[in-house]
Image (cartoon, rainbow, N blue to C red):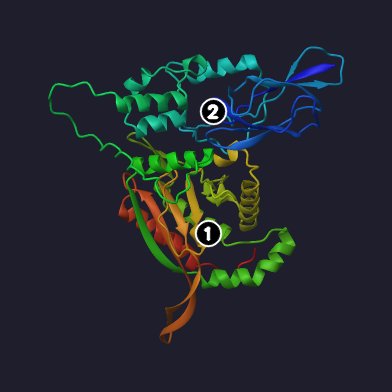
Amino acid sequence: MAQVELIMPKMGESIMEATILRWVKNPGDSVEIDEPILEIATDKVDTEVPSPVSGVIAQVLFKENDVVPVGKVIAVISTEGESAQPLPTPSIAEAPASNGALSNGQHSPAPAEAVPATASSAPAQVRAAGEGARFYSPLVRNIAQKEMISTQELEAVPGSGQQGRVTKKDILAYVEQRRHTPATPQPAAPAPATPASVPAAPAVSVSGNVEIVEMDRMRKLIADHMVMSKHTSPHVTSFVEVDVTEIVNWRERVKKQFEARYGEKITFTPIFIEAVTKALRDFPMVNISVDGTKLIVKKDINIGMAAALPSGNLIVPVIKNADLLSLPGLTKAVNDLAGRARANQLKPEEIQGGTFTLTNVGTFGNVMGTPIINQPQVAILATGAIRKKPAVVETPYGDLIAVRQMMFLSLSYDHRVVDGALGGSFLRRVGDYLEQFDANRGF
């Protein structure tokens, strides 16, 4: 009887721990290869951990809701065999950093092959991540930035994580203590202007006919991310109205043939993404991130598309190198990612590395919206509902009033680095590409 160790997999760059949400299998249960054993959650994604072998669950080493470091043995599986030496299970490997890889979590779009990892290899990874400086996860850094905690102050925060690392629990406890500790008086002296502090949340009355519902874990993460984005970037939103009559008529005409040929239903989303990628090639300074006073210009165009989950939460899967895909390729990618997002089957690398985000508020019947930037990107486009409206049409015989299929596009952008001229010109270019859609094109 051989034994195989099930190890907490590494779910992506800078992810050093995961929370056990639920054990699908318990001690004594049989398990087949690739059958889910447990569900785990990180700051980025929820996922299932499959079994690397067929056998019987011999031992479970952690309880539900335990936070477990990457590389730690979480269960032991007994298998048929003669070897008594426990064998490690492969972990989920992160993509290797490319020349364009950043410390903020951006990835090269090329997938990495899975590599074996054992419990003894995890501390080495932790040391490498913090080499020359104390390691902080993106979530801890975001909380520190939101709470105006300087690097020097953060260095003094005691950490309870592996190798003394500061966890989310540590930083939140420090923030709470900091709020109740009177500030040490400082000598009066002129100082440079600093950003305004975040105002305290207003008191909420719970009297009367109310129900108190605790946010789920994902909603808390979304809330933190949205507040951080508004606190980081001064948002400006521009709007244009575009005539998409040719697109609507073309899709209505070819959708059955398209599905018969490619086995995919074509929606408007891949057509919108195609126009966005063309405009990003024309205006590369919208496809950037900000690192202090440096602008990181992305050579890859990776489009994130906001997808609503059945729970009401949002997730943003990413289409890598979207500018290199044909319309059928974009359609297949959109349908695949949207379907697996709703089924909670996305891989960690599929929600990382985005350089620009598209959100379709028209899905909910909204004509326009003012979306919040998905950090560390600098712009996000919202597409509104397509409505029939009377519009002026220019013809060789003069202007006419006709019923046209119209929609609003709204672009929110980071005014630190994208001014009105750039943001407005980019948005108009997206609209131009949609209005110039060739109704006689093939697939």
Q: x and y percent of residue 21 in the render?
A: 62, 33
Question: Quadrant of the rendered structure where residue 263 is?
Answer: bottom right
Query: At x 53% / y 55%, what residue is drawn?
Result: 273
**Residue 251 in the image: above or below residue 381:** below
**Residue 13 in the image: above or below residue 297:** above
Quarter of the figure that contains the C terminus: bottom right
**Residue 102 in the image: above or below residue 304:** above
Query: At x 50% / y 44%, what residue is drawn?
Result: 213
Secondary structure of the residue carrying numbered label 2: loop
Q: x and y percent of residue 146 in the render?
A: 36, 34
- The reply, left or right, for residue 56 in relation to residue 333 is right
Secondary structure of the residue carrying numbered label 1: helix
Q: x and y percent of residue 229 in the render?
A: 39, 42
Which residue type carries mark 2?
Ile
Please name whichever residue, 213 or 163, is drawn nearer the observer in this view of the structure.
213
**Residue 306 in the image: above or below residue 229:** below
- The residue at which mark 1 appears reads as 272
Q: Is residue 103 visible?
A: no
Please name whichever residue, 273 or 54, is drawn nearer the observer in this view of the structure.
54
- The reply, left or right, for residue 186 in relation to residue 310 is left
Sequence-wise, the earlier of marks 2 and 1 is 2
Task: Give the CA distance from mark 2 to mark 1.
Answer: 33 Å
- The residue at which mark 2 appears reads as 15
Which residue type carries mark 1?
Phe
